[in-house]
Amino acid sequence: MASHLKDFYTPEEYLKLERKAAYKSEYYTGEIFAMSGASRAHNLIVINVATALNTQLENSEYEVYASDMRVRTPDRATYTYPDIVVVCDQPQFEDVEVDTLLNPTLIIEVLSPSTETHDRTKKFADYRKIESLKEYILIAQRECRVTQYIKQPDGMWLFQEASSLGEMAHLTSVNCDLALEIVYRKVEFPSPQEEESP
């Protein structure tokens, strides 16, 4: 998320503006926020993970979308662009534009310092409203860390984390494995000195 535009928009107003816009914006309960550009590490992680998932799922009913597939919560309070979305079976869309997905199975977000708190709290709370969502993955870009939230049959969410390049994260919702060395291929983590600088 980045800059705030105007006081209040309806979902219809947001979609009308968004479909004509030269840049992407997300929608949160009446407010529109322009999205900022992504870092080199962020882009590398997204393409590494999307490629790994698409390769493993190429002969299945799943579809993998990276960065540009908008997702809507059932209450129409939130429209976002997750970094990666996977949907099982037949994707369902809001309207004939086929650009707003309603039934994601797996959502993956790559964290940045400016969005991490939002992705871990408010955004996750919004995503949990989506009945079809079975798993939420958060991938750090400044350190080796993949956090998984896996929906259990009773509706509770199980927390798991991997933090070593030698580890494998098993994505239960889509029955895929993500080797962290693949997730972080060509990604350079900042030095402790760089982490301390403003």
Image (tube, helix red, strand yellow):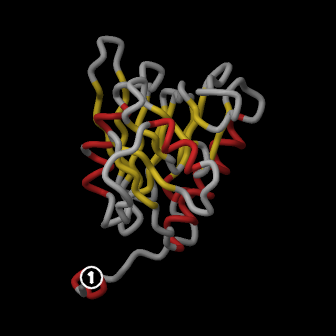
Tell me which residue sits at (46%, 40%) in the image.
79
Q: Residue furthest right?
A: 59
Percent x, y of residue 149: 34, 35
- Quarter of the picture containing the C terminus is bottom left
Determine whether 166 is above or below 101 in the image. below
**What residue is rendered at 53% in x and 45% in y?**
178
Residue occupied by mark 1: 192
At 30% from the left and 85% from the top, the residue drawn is 194
Seen in the picture, residue 17 relative to 133 is either above or below; the reply is: below
Q: How many marks?
A: 1
In depth, the one of 74 and 125 nearer the eye is 74
The kind of residue on which mark 1 rests is Pro
Describe the element under mark 1 as helix, strand or loop. Answer: helix
Label 1 packing within 10 angstroms: few (<14), some (14-19), many (20+): few
> Above or below — where is 18 with respect to 56?
below
**Residue at point 64%, 27% (across, down):** 95
- In the depicted structure, whether residue 115 falls above or below residue 38: above
Q: Where does residue 12 sit, x and y in percent of width and height?
A: 51, 36
Residue 1, given in percent of the width and then of the height, sits at: 38, 59
x, y percentage for residue 148? Answer: 37, 40
